[in-house]
Image: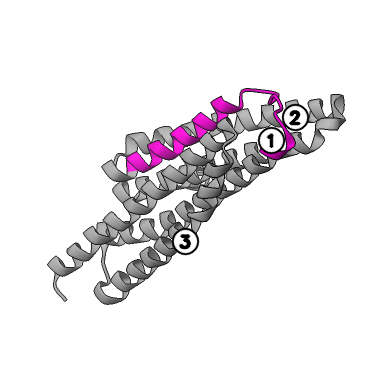
Amino acid sequence: MSSAHMHREIEGLKRRILTVGAMVEQAIAQAISALARNDAALSRSVIEHDSEVDRMEIEVEEECLKILALYQPVAGDLRFVIAVLKMNNDLERMADLAVNIATRALRLGKLGEIRPPGDLPEMAQKAKGMVKKSLDALVQSDTTLAREVCDADDILDAMRSDFHTRIMEQIREHPEQVESLLNLHAVTRHLERLGDMATNVAEDVIYMVDGDIVRHPALREPTNTPK
């Protein structure tokens, strides 16, 4: 089959993965908004629409496998298809995390209002920003944006660690709040995982554009061995 035909298929694949990314970004934004506003209807909407992302994930995977089997792409085209396969899985997992946050929001709404022992909105916005920037990097094939996402992951990890310490202290001081606090603890874990998934997407963008594998940089460092 012709190279032109293959490139039309690849362009179609790019449109599909960008559609999945937009759906996932919306689900995350809605889940975080539902948590902040104690909006049960919005939480349920996030949960109910997760099947749409699951369906799209399957379609993208099938399209990637078809391109690999029919056209046997090489060089940049091959890197693109491989990167999309990996991103596709991470995006589906992000959608699952949005569902998890929405589910916790529903539980917290039933338990009554509680003041988080830390700046949960800031952490949520940090995670959401990392997801958005990783998808912008994908749309624009921008490795500078992608590397900024990778750098931000350590900040989100530190925020999660601080929340863990604060929540454990508040559980000891207010054991009657334990159920609500454990749900908040789970939310911070989901936000941290969103950052991890965004970092994966950013690393895949770098691989797609530059062919540079940055996921395990220590493995690429030269070692000084005695002669």
Q: Secondary structure at mark 1?
A: helix
| Residue 186: quadrant of the picture | top right
Residue 14 on image: x %, y % = 28, 55
| Cα–Cα span, label 2 and label 1 | 8 Å
Would you call the spot at circle 1 few (<14 residues within 10 Å), some (14-19), or many (20 or more)?
many
Task: Report crowding for label 2: few under 14, some 14 to 19, many 20 or more residues within 10 A (C-alpha).
Answer: many
- Identify whether 152 is placed above or below 104: above
Is disc 3 in contact with disc 1, using a CB cutoff of under 8 Å?
no
Q: Nearer the viewer, mark 2 or mark 3?
A: 3
Q: Residue at x 33, y 68 (%)?
A: 63
Residue at (85% x, 31% y) in the render: 176
Question: For the residues carrying marks 2 and 1, which lies nearer the camera in this image?
Answer: 1
* Residue 146 coordinates in the image, percent (x, y): 38, 38
Asked if residue 73 shows in the view, the reply is yes
Q: Is residue 22 left or right of 219 when viewed as pictured? A: left
* 116 over 144 or under it: above or below: above
Q: In the orientation shown, which residue stands out farthest toward the front?
A: 41
Q: Which mark is residue 184?
A: 1
Here the colouring is one colour
Q: Earlier in the sequence, mark 2 or mark 3?
A: 3
Assign the magenta stretch its main secondary structure. Answer: helix
Task: Specify the label residue 54 is tagged with.
Answer: 3
- Seen from the viewer's position, the closer of residues 226 and 214 is 214
Q: Residue at x 58, y 44 (%)?
A: 102
- Of labels 2 and 1, earlier in sequence is 2
Q: Position of residue 32 (x, y in %)?
A: 53, 36
Q: Is residue 144 magenta?
A: no
> In this orientation, which residue lies closer to the viewer: 79 or 141?
141
**Circles 2 and 1: CB distance less than 8 Å?**
yes
Amino acid, disc 3: Asp
Segment colored magenta: 108-137
Image quadrant occupied by the N terminus = bottom left
